Image (spheres, grey):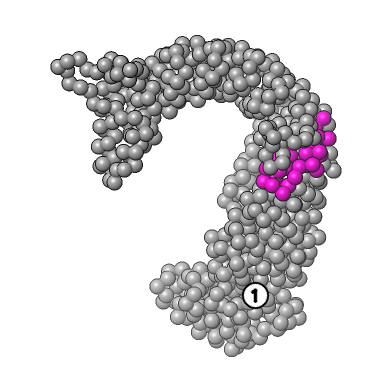
Amino acid sequence: ARGAQHARRCSPPPGSVPPLPVPPRRELIRNVRACKTQADERACIHKECAAIRTAFKEENNELRHRNVAKLLFIHMLGYPTHWGQMECLKLVAGTKFPEKRVGYLGLMILLDERAEVLMLVENSLKNDLHHQNQYIAGLAMCSLANIATVEICRDLSPEVETLLSNSNPYVRKKACMCAIRILKKNPELVENYVDKVPSVLGDRNHGVLLTGCKLMFEMTELDPSTIEPLRKEVPTLVRVLKNLVLSGYAPEHDINGITDPFLQVAILKLLRVLGRGSAECSDMMNDILAQVATNTESSKNVGNAILYECVLTIVAIEAESGLRVLAINILGRFLMNRDNNIRYVALNTLVQVVNSDMNAVQRHRNTIVDCLKDADVSLRRRALELICVLVNETNVESMVGELLAYLPVVESEYKEDLVTKICSVVERFAPDKQWRVDTIIKTLTMSGAYVSDDLASSLVSLISKSPEIQGYTTAKLHAALKDDLVNAAQTLVQVGVWCVGEYADMLDGSHGGEPVSPTQAIDLLATVLKSVTSSLTTKEYVLNALVKCSVRYAGNAEVQGRVRTLVQPYTSSIALELQQRAVEYATLFNGADAIRSGVLERMPAMEKKQKPQDAMAAARAAQATSNGRSGGGGGGGGGG
């Protein structure tokens, strides 16, 4: 009977065109899924949209919320639905819960804070915030927390402040979420909520506590001046965390045997902010942090999340030294976990704390080195960064050995960076110059073409300043180039050629290293000069070295003749720089013997070439000093 009455009530008047039937939502979904092509789907959606528009024009209130629900499905498929926004406002203004539920859902999905029609809903939001039905009030607060504009947040802030003290925990939880949105949009209102926090933290409902902690954290982020007044809540937070850690099994909050890990993580993050820079607050936290670190089960991912936040908090606050060691030991356990995500988190955190707790991190050095052998490239990158920080005078030889073992297997795009880091570590912590030279040469030999020019400058500077290793280094470089010239980096070849030219007279074995005869030295230079792998710059180095060898072996007629023979062809080279050098050197041989030894004498000690940014910084510092002096002089003159 009711169905018949409804059919008569909804039937069109006689003589009018009947409206398009609006199928149920399930039938719409079924029809869309049955479409085989994109064109079929568009036709189905256009037909449905036409039916929904007709229903909206007829002001059919009974079916409006169902049509808006279908409109949300159409919006999810990517079709325009802006023409249905006003229907959402009508549903929000209704009195029934099903209508309001769909209306607020459509409001959050179809609109955003840039929509001009949003100002029309402010009055409905204000009324529903104080609705007797908690779920309607919750819908209003969810919408406010998602799409409210700056003006709406400012206007409704007093209502939200009042709801923070509501007797219903469901309403208080939603009010905290609204407060976060309001403060993000209007940071100047933060001070209005500072006094509301104690009532939230004193709640027994975990949902209210969690959102309250989130609210406090956002307040400290938006306005750091609120950290000091909020520090008085540290004892309350410690008490809540202690109850969570030491409480027994609570089925409504238990996740894998741990009581409400989400709330524990939120409290730890908040304690980290409040304890940073405050010795008094840090003392209050020490005991509970130690309990969390020792009592939390680490076999499950839930426990690892809490332990990670606990470690970050211990590192950030003014914690006791024993507690910091405990935190780093937890990270050491993370490194032995089979989950690569947990290992990455541990390496990332150790990189941040290594400078403040070097000795504690050094205990896990072997585990960190093992990460270099992992298949995951991100783990290897993090481990490499940490290892370079861990190197010092006592472990440099073993650590550099591990890095050299890693060099052949590292990806090509990271090889140059690794070579630079190895040479930097060797330069800083080498036990003696000979070991430093041996290691750098070995590194450059293994690296192939992945060598920066700065390393050559650094090595040349070291050799030129260290007369005691010049002969030894030249012999080592000669042997390295002789063994594998084809695969040697051009940087290494250039340094070796330069050393042979400068210190050829030290290759007799009396200065260290294997003895090298003049013929062997010239043979190497000739091989490099004729090699197809030698660059134009390398050949320029070779011409310099050849003409210098003519002075280093001044009494050897064979050497003089070979040098002239090797230089002569390049006097007509198509490379202008090579031609110019060869012509000038040939001139030195023809009638300029008197000045040749003076022109080609040994280079003085050279400074390491500065990087452009370093040179600019030095220039600015010098300019500032000069300005300071001139300013001081001018002041003195004025006083006189």
509 vs 556, left or right, is: right
558 vs 280, left or right, is: left
* The C terminus, quarter of image: top right
24 vs 582, left or right, is: left
Q: Position of residue 166 (x, y in %)?
A: 63, 14
Looking at the image, is 568 positioned above or below residue 462?
below
Residue at the location (47% across, 18% down)? 97
Q: Which quadrant would residue 83 be assigned to in this image?
A: top left
The furthest residue to the left: 15
Q: Amino acid at mark 1?
A: Leu
The furthest residue to the front: 1
Looking at the image, is 49 positioned above or below residue 320?
above
Residue at the location (73% across, 31% down)? 271
Which residue is labeled 1 in the image?
Answer: 477
Q: Which quadrant would residue 605 be assigned to in this image?
A: bottom right
Q: Position of residue 568 (x, y in %)?
A: 47, 81
Task: Out of 596 and 29, give the one closest to the viewer.
Answer: 29
Task: Out of 63 and 178, give the one closest to the viewer.
Answer: 63
Residue 366: in sight, yes or no?
Answer: yes
Is residue 264 on the magenta stretch? no
Instruction: Give the magenta-colored segment's residue range.
Output: 284-311
Helix, strand or loop: magenta stretch: helix
Residue at the location (67% across, 56% down)? 338
SS of the residue under disc 1: helix
Q: Position of residue 607 (x, y in %)?
A: 66, 59
Looking at the image, is 293 positioned above or below residue 528?
above
Q: Position of residue 148 (x, y in %)?
A: 49, 21
* The N terminus, quarter of image: top left
